[in-house]
């Protein structure tokens, strides 16, 4: 039984590790080197494409007993970068309106830092009911809510023109889901804070 569970966990990890590397690698480049947003994402793409190439090479060798010709090598390189690039482009640019509280918030998605968008789109594949309740803010929003303005809020556009924070609905969701949600973003290198403010939600911030 233990051996069976070990095998299951091993294969699950092999499947999800490219997604972890893509996002966590991008966040790492952002934190450690402060690169421009899309350079961080590109770095994550390169790391993940290399990993996918290793996967393809391993499986090819397992089935054929050889690594293949130089043309097969080039095809695996192309396929790896193509697959990861398509996934990232779709994840950064395309979102379903149902995953946003209002259409106005949906329009703010392009204001979000690309790494934040990529992490959200990846999670939405597993959590279709995820709802973003807040993204970009203006100083006037705080007065309309009857709250003191937080001038250091990451919901404001930062020096690079992107918003570094997003709020996700936790109301009417199980605590298991909310805990898993917070754990996911924490593991990816984001700051997480559960608070009420105008409503119960999980605040996600890119450091």
Image: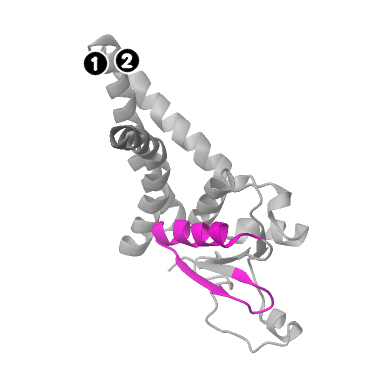
How far across and down, in percent of the image, does residue 191 sit? 45, 68
Residue 67 image label: 1
Q: Residues within 10 Å of mark 1 (few under 14, many from 20)?
A: some
Say which residue appears at 49% left-offset and 62% top-offset.
182
The magenta stretch is 173-201
207 vs 174, nearest the viewer:
174
How far across and down, in percent of the image, does residue 119 sit? 50, 52
CA gap, disc 1 to disc 2?
A: 8 Å
Q: Nearer the viewer, mark 1 or mark 2?
A: 1
Q: How is the image coloured?
A: one colour
Instruction: Identify residue for label 2.
Output: 72
Q: State the image quarter where residue 14 is shown.
A: top left
* Sequence-wise first label, 1 or 2: 1
Q: Is residue 84 left or right of residue 135?
A: left
Say which element carries label 2: helix
How far across and down, in percent of the image, does residue 126 sit? 56, 44
Q: Count of labels shown?
A: 2
Say which element carries label 1: loop
Say which residue appears at 50% left-offset and 66% top-offset.
160
Say which residue appears at 76% left-offset and 60% top-offset.
102
How far across and down, in percent of the image, does residue 190 sit? 44, 63
Q: Is residue 77 magenta?
A: no
In this rendering, is residue 117 above or below 139? above
Is residue 42 among what the camera can see? no
In this rendering, is residue 126 above or below 135? above
113 vs 174, nearest the viewer:
174
In this rendering, is residue 37 above or below 1? below
- Assess whether mark 2 and mark 1 are in contact (beta carbons under 8 angstroms): yes
Q: Quadrant of the C terminus?
A: bottom left
Q: Is residue 198 magenta?
A: yes
Residue 36 image label: none
Say which residue appears at 64% left-offset and 68% top-offset.
136
């Amino acid at each position: 039984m233990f051996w069976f569970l070990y095998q299951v966990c091993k294969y699950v990890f092999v499947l999800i590790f490219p997604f972890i590397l893509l996002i966590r690698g991008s966040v790492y480049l952002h934190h450690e080197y402060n690169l421009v947003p899309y350079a961080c994402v590109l770095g994550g793409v390169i790391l993940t494409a290399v990993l996918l190439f290793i996967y393809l090479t391993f499986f090819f060798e397992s089935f054929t007993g050889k690594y293949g010709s130089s043309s097969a090598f080039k095809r695996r390189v192309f396929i790896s970068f193509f697959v990861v690039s398509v996934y990232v482009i779709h994840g950064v640019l395309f979102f379903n309106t149902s995953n946003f509280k209002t259409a106005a918030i949906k329009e703010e998605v392009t204001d979000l830092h690309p790494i934040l968008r990529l992490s959200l789109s990846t999670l939405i594949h597993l959590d279709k009911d995820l709802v973003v309740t807040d993204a970009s803010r203006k100083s006037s929003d705080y007065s309309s809510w009857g709250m003191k303005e937080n001038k250091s809020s990451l919901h404001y556009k930062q020096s690079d023109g992107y918003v570094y924070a997003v709020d996700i609905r936790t109301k009417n969701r199980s605590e298991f889901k909310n805990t898993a949600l917070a754990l996911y973003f924490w593991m990816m290198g984001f700051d997480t804070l559960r608070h009420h403010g105008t409503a119960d939600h999980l605040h996600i911030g890119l450091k």
